[in-house]
Image (cartoon, rainbow, N blue to C red):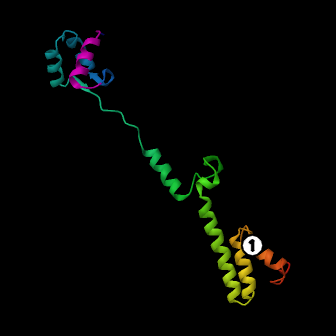
Amino acid sequence: MPDLTNQRRLASQLLKCGVGRVWIDPASQEELADAVTRSDIRSAISARVIRAKAIQGTSRGRARRHAAEVAKGRHQGPGSRRGTPSSRIPRKERWITRIRAQRDLLVELRQKKSIPPAVYREFYRRAKGGMFRSRAHLLINLRLAGHLPAEAPA
């Protein structure tokens, strides 16, 4: 097997690609050992004895499949999480969902006449102050204050 290092180097310059991408036909290696000039290499390129290999890309297939699964809600467990809970769902967004739920509950109770307007206003202000963690916590506090009847044991 002849040493075609020089021919490979010249071909890479002519093909404007790296030395690793130069493909030389194994059947024509003996004749190419005599090709020493650029014109010899050019004629070998035109005869398709020397070619540039296609650029090897990185397949995006796996990445696309993973992205589709994430869109469905997969791969979101604790092992996949980077960042604090407040960076994943902003503090303000969590506050908005919580306070809206509590205010809706208070409005509902007032409309059903379960609580008088004065109690509604008092607990509305407490909710605004961030006193309650959730709707359930708000209901517990209303019951403890004696504004709602105690829950029947299940």
Q: Residue at x 59, y 63 (%)?
A: 93
Quadrant hosting residue 60: top left
| Magenta stretch holds residue 6 | yes
| Magenta stretch holds residue 82 | no
Image quarter (top left, top right, bottom left or bottom right) of the N terminus:
top left
Provide residue 68's location: percent of width, then percent of height.
48, 54
Q: Is residue 70 above or below residue 105?
A: above
Extreme residue toward the bottom, this view: 113
State which region is magenta. Answer: 2-17
The front one of 69 and 31 is: 69
Provide residue 129's location: percent of width, then percent of height.
71, 69
The front one of 107 and 153 is: 107
Provide residue 36's location: percent of width, then percent of height.
19, 10
Q: Find disc 1 in the rendering and name its residue.
A: 136
The type of residue carrying mark 1 is: Ala
Provide residue 107's location: percent of width, then percent of height.
66, 83
Say if residue 112 shows up in the picture. Answer: yes
Please state if 105 lies on the left or on the right of 58 as rendered.
right
Image quarter (top left, top right, bottom left or bottom right) of the C terminus:
bottom right
Q: Residue at x 53, y 58 (%)?
A: 72
Please state if 137 lies on the left or on the right of 76 as rendered.
right
Name the secondary structure under disc 1: helix
